[in-house]
Amino acid sequence: MSGIGWHIFAFGAIAIFLIVIVYRTIAISRLPVHLRWELAPIPHEKGKARYGGSYLEEYEWWRKRQSRSFMAPVLYMAAEILLLRGVWKHNRALWPLSFAFHAGIYLIALMLLFSLVSALLIITEVPSGVVDVFLAIASVLAAAGYLLGGLGAVGLILKRALDTNLRSFNTVSKYFNLVFLVALFITGAYAWFASTDFASTMSLFIKGLVTLDGGVTLALPLSVHIVISLLFLIYLPMTDMIHFVAKYFTYHEIRWNDEPKNEKMIEELNGLLDQPVSWSAIHVKADGKKNWVDLTTKKMSDDEKA
Amino acid sequence: MAQMELAGNTYEVDENGFMQETDRWNEDVARAYAALEDVNELTEEHWTAINYLRNYYLGNGICPMIRRLIKESGFKLSKLYELFPNGPAQSACKWAGVPKPTGCV
Amino acid sequence: MKKLKLTDIARGEDTQLIEINPNELIPLPPPYDRVEALPGFKQLTEEQRGRLVCNLDGVVSYAALPKTKNKEEEKKYVEQFVSGMKKLLSKENNWTFLQPLLLSIDYCAQCQTCCDACPIYLASGRNDLYRPTYRSEIFRRLVNKYVRPVGKLRAKLSGGDIELNWTTITRLYELSYRCNLCRRCAQSCPMGVDNALITRELRKLFSQELGWAPKELHEKGTVLQLEVGSPTGLRPDVAIDNLQFLDEEFTEATGTKVSTPWDKEGADILLIHSAGDIISFPEGPISFSIICNAAGINWTLSSEIPGYDGVNYGVFYDDVQLARVAIRHAQIAKKLGVKKIVMGECGHQHKAFMTVADRVLTGDLDIPRESVMTFLENLVFSGKIKFDPSKNNFPVTLHDPCNVVRNLGIVEPQRRILRYLCPQFREMTPHGVDNYCCGGGGGLSVMSDVNFTDWKVHVAGRMKFKQVLEAFADRPGSEVKKYICAPCLNCKLQFRDLLDYYGAREKSGIICGGLAELIVNAMVDVKKPFIQWEEL
């Protein structure tokens, strides 16, 4: 592939990635408000999160303003995302592999960021000394990212295949995801070793994309790696690997959602309670027309009299 | 529904053998239940407890609290366990032909 | 132990999937370590096996389904299961839990981290059937196969395709009642997936679509409560009569005048006990009467159906019944014109009424609701009542009801009371929001028929019993009287079964009671000892 083909492929993949993620995020966020189902500990509970306490411990809690911490949930999520806090705490044996795997992805993302910055610096004709620093950092990030990611992904495949605790839950798609990522990491690592100057090639490639330069060409190893990476970018949002999005909701909207009703919520709830119910069991007494309010506020015996 | 033969008749019972048709109870049923738990003779004391339980159930739709049974029958809990091998809830209620207490009890 | 595959759930028709061997369960400390010295694990009779569906683990409760008469009927139920899955995923029929359900279905990473958090799985000696992931992964695959686009093809391609048949649904039904809904698994999940929620959704599907629910929870549970007033069958007049009897009894026994107000309009506080407490643990409700009167509180109980029974089994299995009971409770409080409602010592009442049903109590039904732990803490430290903590000088440990602690974050008030009033208070390990369930959670404590209690004392409650023994390990002998403070009726019922089965009152001197009893026992004005160590 050369010239304009790369542009179409790369921008297309990025666009699909973003569109699908945004679409799925909106789809989750638009699901109706649910009944409360919070779970301690909730980090935003000021002074109480340490032992898992909540504002419901307070005498006549409804008379007090809940003192919520803004920073505590952010720090909690930072440790969860960057260090895999939950896996460390509850599944230490899995942590080294899972951490290496995730760290690999984070480092590669960071490498791309540095490469992009380098590309912009080259375009704006910043002195090459500065660019070289960025390229050097990008090169280290790439090597570390491919290595860690590759080790993690291969390790996770082996663990899935060998650990009897996991084996019976494996599916083809879980393996496929990991194999895909192994291919991504290994082709990346190979491209790094095969090229004398991986980082600047990458930056120049990005520069070519950004400036819509039709003359972009790449050596075979890096081409293969970039093709796989872009395919993965398209594939990723179609799978459950977008748990980084889902996690926002499982934590903030469910576990940590201890919000009392407010006017906006009540308005939404009134609409939801007004919907017809069609569950079939006799005791529900639904007929597809009666709504939630009809079914739950009348005494059971009222119906029989009527 | 499970069924059980007691004193020559068949009765609907729950999985633990408690009668589901309280009004079909008679004294022979009580004796038959007792015999299944190796109590071959029902004494005056047995009948005091059984009749109290049964009458309370018929009047109130529920078995009496243990405390009440103890007070009204005059038997301590240990005595009730002597009379009814599996205790007031598992034996006495069953022999009296009232359903097993359910719910959070 | 035999490894179990997910696909096994659909295979073998009426044959039992696993066998529970008491020797494979995790060991208990002495003197409870010898399986042969225990009363044994009740086995089903041939007659029961012939009549009931018992194809899971050889354990059945009142939940057991009768065998069907023909294949047609079986097919009908299987079709209903599919329509139920569709309704669970629809906004109209399941807005109540749609978002949490979808997220838990779609984002499990199959890492099995949650298994080590589950007391039932651990206690069972790691039996595959009891993994929190076993039932939910099966359900997940069925949902993906039958409700999602090109599901059948994807199921074939992905491997581990699970067949949906009568065996699958009947086993799933029983299996949905082998979970305490304690949510320890959810706490440990890095993704925030909630297997307890999936279990409850599965129960909802069976109840709301197929009409399958354990008799104790439904027919003799919520239905009886809405009709008669209480799942115990306690009628309003009998409730009042019983408490009058208890008022007199305890006035005599304690030398303190006890009286309980009923249906007082304009009282500040409506206290809703569980009716089971009145019947089985009357020291609890009576303690509240003593404490409230001593502190000069303007309070009342209600005798309106079902205002004297705060339980709400709907939170275990059915959203419609949950809402019906909660709304009825709120309507009663509104009618009395109270300023707040105080939850009795009942965990699931707390969760159902304070949070889960919060968003169906709109408008003037939104009457403030407070936990009994907070309420009691306020009274104990108000200075209105004089205490002598030395009256409680015996070992006390605290059980954390999951629904109050892990689910609502009400952790410290009860501890502050115990640290003040019980000189020998000690914690279990782990405790607080990391506690283990008593084994009666999720409605299981009211399910007792056939050999279900055997399962509860052997498997579900095993971790808890072990924890209790370890907490008292410094004073093991039966001559030292020890108290498990379990401020929840369902937990107390489970402890009663555990202590009875293992003979722990005789062997270790352990009894179980509520929190209010310890408060009354320490009151200077209550002259006679309130807590009775011997049976009546």
Image (tube, rainbow, N blue to C red):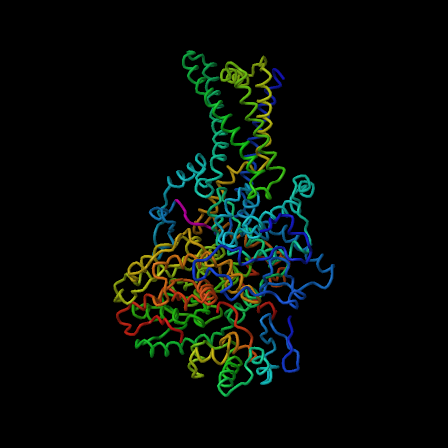
How many numbered dots are placed on residues in this image?
A: 0
Q: Is residue A133 left or right of residue A34?
A: left
Position of C437 relative to C295 (above/below):
above
Position of C194 relative to A12 (above/below):
below
Q: Nearer the viewer, residue C33 or C130?
A: C33
Q: Is residue C89 visible?
A: no
Q: Is residue C419 left or right of residue A86?
A: left
Position of C53 relative to A207 (above/below):
below
* Quadrant in which the N terminus of chain A is drawn: top right
Q: Is residue C461 visible?
A: yes
Q: Extreme bottom residue here?
A: B44
Q: Residue at x 70, y 58 (%)?
A: C74
Query: Where are the magenta residues, as a range?
Result: A37-43
Q: Nearer the viewer, residue A200 or C486?
A: C486
Is A40 colored magenta in this rendering? yes
Position of B6 relative to A147 (above/below):
below
Q: Is residue B48 left or right of residue C530?
A: right
Where residue C15 appears, x then y in whole percent?
Answer: 67, 57
Is C170 colored magenta in this rendering? no
Where residue A4 appears, x then y in whole percent?
Answer: 61, 17
Q: Residue at x 61, y 74 (%)?
A: B13
Q: Nearer the viewer, residue C192 or A281?
A: C192
